[in-house]
Image (spheres, helix red, strand yellow):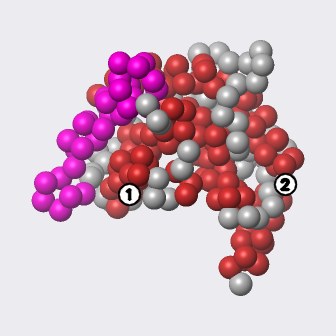
Amino acid sequence: RIRKVLEKAVACIEQSQTATGGFGYDPVPTGDHEGSVTVTVAQGLRAARDAGLVVDPNVVKRGLRYLKNSQKPDGSFKYSLYVDRSSYALTAAALSSFYLYGRYIDLPGERVLARGLRYMMDQVRTVLRTHRWYYYGHFYAAWTCWQKDGDEWDPRSGGTWARWHQLVYPHLLAKQRSGDGGWSDEYDQFEFGDVLPTAFAILALAIPDEVLPIFQR
């Protein structure tokens, strides 16, 4: 029964992909699309594929093209093809999407992933001081860095994961409340409350445990 439902969910997602290759908030192929939705859709498709369901390779191909077209000259990734705003969080989400779609290394002659990773790592110290999407960004950054080279923990190696986790994990842990163990988001403009930042923080910290299959390298 679950498989039948998942097959319908995958079909719904595939039919909702826009002409750009991205995804919007509604399950219809309109012109609306943006990176934050696209990464969640990529998670769903990857989880379905890993569970044995068939995902149309053309959907993946168009998704990868969308991500590539979303990159700016400085290596960051835009909110959408029509909105030029980029950030550490959006870049981390886009890089995660590449990995979810199965693209782990740059194609010959390209430096899409390399430039994105360089931008993200250059922004880490600034983001630790103040960032509107702190928890969202670090969750996807943790995912990205772990997929990149999570087998290397020694910062002296110069590895992406080693350098990132040495900077971010202590900062993230210091934000945890001693009373109830939760986290708060000072930029919570949508009034999500403490559940969302707490969930993002726990997931970011738990990625190396690879308890969830989607986090496994």
Q: Residues within 10 Å of mark 1 (few under 14, many from 20)?
A: some
In the rendered image, the quadrant that contains the C terminus is top right
Look at the magenta stretch and give its main secondary structure.
Answer: helix
Label 2 sits on what residue type?
Asp
Q: Is residue 191 left or right of residue 67?
A: left
Q: Secondary structure at mark 2?
A: loop
167 in magenta:
yes
Residue 186 location in percent, x, y? 29, 45
Q: Nearer the viewer, residue 36 or 26?
A: 36
Callout 1 amino acid: Ala
Q: Residue 143: image x %, image y %?
A: 50, 42
Is the Cβ of the residue at disc 1 closer than 8 Å to that at disc 2? no
The image quarter in which residue 44 lies: bottom right
Which label sits in the foreground, 1 or 2?
2
Q: Residue at x 45, y 58 (%)?
A: 211
In magenta, the rendered stretch is 153-182
Q: Which residue is mark 1?
A: 199
Q: Is residue 49 above or below residue 65?
A: below
The residue under the point 70% across, 36% down is: 103
Name the residue carrying label 2.
Answer: 56
